[in-house]
Amino acid sequence: MTYSVAMTGTVDDQIRSHLLRADGDEDLCFALWRPSSGASRNTGLIVEAVLPLDGERHIHGNASFESRYFLRATALASQQTCGLALLHSHPDADGWQGMSEDDTNAERDHAAQAKVLTGLPLVGLTLSGEDSKWSARFWIRTAAREYRADRCENVRVVGSQLRISYNPEILPPPQQDKRHARTVSAWGDRAQAQLSRARVGVIGLGSVGSAVAECLARIGIVHIKLMDFDTLKEHNLDRCVSATREDVGQAKVAVAKRYLEKSSTASKPVIQASELSIVEDAGFRLALDTDVLFCCVDRPWPRAVLNLIAYAHLIPVIDGGIAIQAGRKGLYGAHWKAHIAAPGRKCLECHRQYDPGLVQAERNGYLDDPRYIEDLPQEHEIRRNENVFPFSMNVASLEILQFLRMVLAPLGISDVGGDDYQFVLGQHQRDESSCRDECLYSRDFLARGDTLRVTVTGTHAVAEAARHERAMDQRFNQSTAG
């Protein structure tokens, strides 16, 4: 199990303004955190700062705190079903910070009591003053009254810009060579080190997802997680990057993984392929191991799940879609869009990227029932499946550009709203609107993590059937070959 920490840009601003003092001295504070449990990574979501009251902490070059401050913060954590985090600053330092003996003792001495009173490990964070980079660790119980600091692999701040601080011992900057020369020339070594170390998930490996994955591999992203339960069919060959006739009948993720391992420019690419659906609990947990997710699906249930992940678990979701109008006289309208669902940005439901009323219908299997589909109006979104590769490539391009802008923030610009392109008229528009005031995702679900008692996953009969059919075909082929 690995560890990470995440917080919204708003929480980061509040804590940073307290820890980075005008007089240059160190400072400290406590905060509350909630767990976000992935398949192989646990993340602490910092949800609220507990700033010191008068006399609760002392500044003397270094900083120290009174026991009553610790007990007050711990009581708040317990009341809100949260864990406790201890944060302090190193004003004259930069990069991921190690721990001094005083730092280690202060955190270790309070790890046991924090665990007993909150039921969750103590989390420690250090903020470097020179570059505002975070470092973090979880204090894990190893024996009676013995605790070990397990260092996090990264800390992500999710706001208009996605800022990730990496632990260089766990995620060192990847080696660059001639394959990256043109890429690095565009945005520089430091930006490339930020981009390439992000753990990126692509959900759906159809026409858009396969193109997104190809671009990520080409620019040197090391860790790419692919997820799709579906089988490559012959009618997919006009749209899926890298797919050939010989691949028909195989899992889409297996085809994509095999190709990306050859096309990746990373020196040691880690391409993981999962034949799961994001709406299955195992797929949901795998998605929580990432730092960024690309939504390349077109059904309401998976989009609703990804929307929840973006806000409840603080993992930005980059989404897009295509709408084509065609009739007897051919194409008469087409537009595509791309946008990011994340704290401070408009969610997918408010973007009208899915109909919440159809989520339960899909969970009940109606959207895969031909009788139900036949009763829908001809122009209903569920009945529309027009798509062509040139349009898919444009959607993939817009999604990648949204990703690059969010991470690189050229000229300090990281969020210009959603992209909406009208093909026939050649018009490109921006959507800078916000969520509705009553939106649950951007308000009530924010940073709730595992404590959000909303069940969004379940049995996905279509995914199970697709995997079963491939397994049966494989057994048949093996038996006939034998």
Image (cartoon, grey):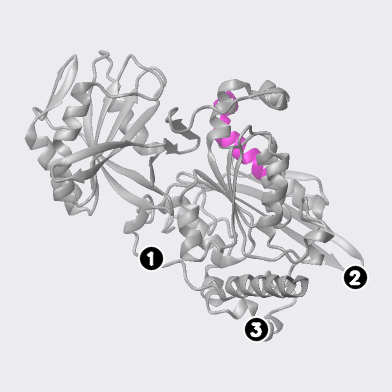
Q: Assess whether residue 162 is covered by the magenta stretch.
A: no
State whether the magenta stretch is mostly helix, strand or loop: helix
> What's the distance in space between the residues labelled 1 and 3, CA to CA?
27 Å
Q: Do the residues labelled 1 and 3 touch (CB within 8 Å)?
A: no
Quadrant containing the C terminus in the rendered view:
bottom right
Residue at numbered disc 2: 328
In this orientation, does residue 465 appear?
yes
Q: Nearer the viewer, mark 1 or mark 2?
A: 1
Q: In the structure shown, which secondary structural element does the residue marked by tag 2 occupy?
A: loop
Q: Which amino acid, by three-letter code, is at mark 2?
A: Arg
> What's the distance in space between the residues labelled 3 and 2, CA to CA?
25 Å
Which range of residues does the magenta coloring cover? Answer: 398-412
> Can you tell which quarter of the image residue 451 is in?
bottom left
Give the x, y percent position of residue 202: 60, 51
Residue at numbered disc 3: 372
- Residue drawn where x is 75% and y is 54% of the image: 335
2, 53: nearer the viewer:
2
- Residue drawn where x is 61% and y is 39% of the image: 269
Give the x, y percent position of residue 186: 68, 23
**In the displayed structure, does residue 446 sit left or right of residue 420?**
left
